[in-house]
C-alpha cells in the first residue's frame, strides 16, 4: 500500500468542525484503495496557545517541512493588536510566495453573475501586507511597502507558467503604478518582461487596481488569470469570491518551490463555533485542489480520480438543494458532509 502523510492544522473557531467534516469525506473517498492518505494532526494558533505551546509549535513546522504539504483550517488573527497572523508566519517560514485562489461559478449556487471562471494569483511575501511597520514618533506610525525585482520576477514567471500549464488565454496585472511608480512600477515592468521574453502566447494586459475593481464587477467574464501584489491580491480575492457566493465556496492554496499549504480562505467565525452550522465546502474544495496537486506532482492519477469523485459529489449536493445555511439551505456541517459521502 502507498501511504502519503499529510499534516493537518484544524484551526480555531469553526476550524475543528469543518476540518473533521472534510477529513470524513476524504476518508470515505479512499476506502478500499491501495493508496492511503494519513492525517497528522498538528497545532497552530489559539489551540496551540491553549495547550501552553508556541503560536506555531516547532513540531508543526517540522512535520510540514518533512511532508512538504499540509491542509489547514482557519486560524484566528486578532484585529489591531495581539499576535501576528499565522498565515503570514507560515508563508514567510516556508517561502510560500504564490497564493492561488480559483473563483468559479458553482452549480446550485445562484448569484447575479454567470460563467465566472477566474484564477487569482497573489505575490505572498512582500508589499504592504508583509507587515513591516514601526512607530516613527509617538502618535505617528509607518507601514513600508517593499518590492524586490527577484520576488516580482519570480511571481510573474510562476503565474505565466501556471496559466500556460492550465491552458489559460490571458493574464491581467492589477497595479497602482501611476502613483507608486517604483514599487508597483517594478511589479508591472517585470510581469511585462516575462510576458514578452517567455510567454508571448498568452495575452497580457494591465489595469489600475481601482478601475480594475470596477471592471470586474461590471463583467467578470472579461478576465481570466489575475496577477496582483500582496495587499491588492488579498482584497481582490475576497471581492471576486463575492461574485460566486462568498468565501464559503472558494478554495485557496499557498505554493513555494517545493512545499504547499492548502487552506480555507475564510475566517474562524468564533461567533458560530461549536454550533455545527458552518459550511465546510471551502476547505473541502481546497482539499480537492490538494489531491489534484499531489496527483500531478507524484504522478498518481488515482488521486485525481478521487478529487473528481468528491467534486461531483458536492456539486450534486448543491444542485439538489442540500446546502448549509449560508447558502440558503438548512443542513448542518456534519449533515452536509454525510450528504457528500452518500453521493460518492
Image: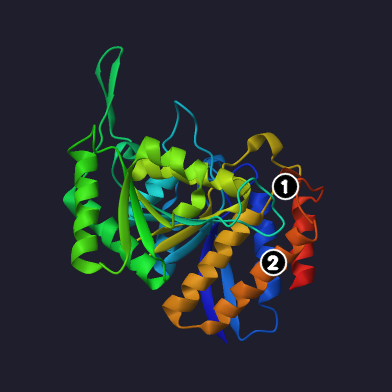
Position of the N terminus by quadrant: bottom right
Using a 10 Å C-alpha cutoff, classify the residue at mark 2 as few (fewer than 14 neighbours), some (14 to 19) or many (20 or more): many
Q: Nearer the viewer, mark 1 or mark 2?
A: 1
Rendered position, 130 above or below 320: above
Q: Residue 81, located in which quarter of the rendered image?
A: top left
Rendered position, 29 above or below 215: below
Q: Is residue 40 visible?
A: no
Q: Is residue 254 visible?
A: yes
Front-lying residue, 91 or 108? 108
Q: Earlier in the sequence, mark 1 or mark 2?
A: 2
Label 1 sits on residue: 327
Front-lying residue, 223 or 138? 223
Front-lying residue, 305 or 327? 327
Q: Name the residue located 30 percent from the left edge and 57 percent from the top edge.
A: 204
| Gap between marks 1 and 2 measured at Cα | 20 Å
How far across and how far down the image is residue 190, in percent? 20, 53
Front-lying residue, 223 or 187? 223
Label 1: state its secondary structure. Answer: helix
Label 2 sits on residue: 25
How far across and how far down the image is residue 344, in percent? 74, 73
Question: In the rendered view, does 42 fall on the left or right side of 127?
Answer: right
Question: In the rendered view, does 121 fall on the left or right side of 14?
Answer: left
Label 2: state its secondary structure. Answer: helix
Q: Name the residue located 56 percent from the left edge and 78 percent from the top edge.
A: 303
Amino acid at each position: 500500500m502507498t501511504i502519503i502523510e499529510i499534516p493537518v492544522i484544524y484551526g480555531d473557531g469553526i476550524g475543528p468542525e469543518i476540518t473533521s467534516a472534510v477529513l470524513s469525506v476524504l476518508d470515505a473517498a479512499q476506502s478500499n484503495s491501495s493508496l492511503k492518505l494519513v492525517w497528522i494532526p498538528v497545532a497552530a494558533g489559539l489551540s496551540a496557545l491553549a495547550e501552553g505551546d508556541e503560536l506555531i509549535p516547532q513540531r508543526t513546522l517540522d512535520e510540514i517541512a518533512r511532508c512538504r504539504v499540509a491542509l489547514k483550517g482557519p486560524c484566528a488573527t486578532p484585529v489591531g493588536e495581539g499576535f501576528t497572523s499565522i498565515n503570514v508566519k507560515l508563508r514567510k517560514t516556508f517561502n510560500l510566495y504564490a497564493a492561488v485562489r480559483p473563483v468559479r461559478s458553482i452549480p446550485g449556487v445562484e448569484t447575479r453573475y454567470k460563467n465566472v471562471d477566474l484564477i487569482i494569483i497573489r505575490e505572498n511575501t512582500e508589499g504592504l501586507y508583509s507587515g513591516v511597520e514601526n512607530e516613527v514618533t509617538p502618535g505617528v506610525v509607518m507601514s513600508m511597502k517593499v518590492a524586490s525585482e527577484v520576488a516580482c520576477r519570480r511571481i510573474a514567471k510562476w503565474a505565466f507558467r501556471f496559466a500556460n500549464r492550465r491552458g489559460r488565454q490571458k493574464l491581467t496585472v492589477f497595479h497602482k503604478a501611476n502613483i507608486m511608480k517604483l514599487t508597483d512600477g517594478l511589479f508591472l515592468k517585470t510581469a511585462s518582461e516575462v510576458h514578452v521574453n517567455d510567454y508571448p502566447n498568452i495575452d497580457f494586459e494591465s489595469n489600475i487596481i481601482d478601475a480594475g475593481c470596477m471592471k470586474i464587477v461590471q463583467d467578470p467574464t472579461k478576465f481570466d488569470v489575475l496577477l496582483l501584489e500582496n495587499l491588492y491580491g488579498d482584497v481582490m480575492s475576497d471581492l471576486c469570491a463575492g461574485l460566486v457566493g462568498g468565501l464559503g465556496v472558494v478554495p485557496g492554496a499557498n505554493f513555494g518551490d517545493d512545499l504547499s499549504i492548502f487552506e480555507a480562505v475564510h475566517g474562524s467565525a468564533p461567533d458560530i463555533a461549536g454550533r455545527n452550522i458552518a459550511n465546510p465546502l471551502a476547505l473541502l474544495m481546497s482539499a480537492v485542489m490538494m489531491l489534484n496537486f499531489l496527483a500531478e506532482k507524484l504522478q498518481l492519477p488515482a488521486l485525481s480520480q478521487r478529487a473528481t469523485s468528491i467534486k461531483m459529489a458536492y456539486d450534486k449536493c448543491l444542485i439538489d438543494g442540500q446546502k448549509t445555511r449560508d447558502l440558503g439551505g438548512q443542513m448542518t456541517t456534519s449533515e452536509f458532509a454525510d450528504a457528500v459521502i452518500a453521493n460518492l
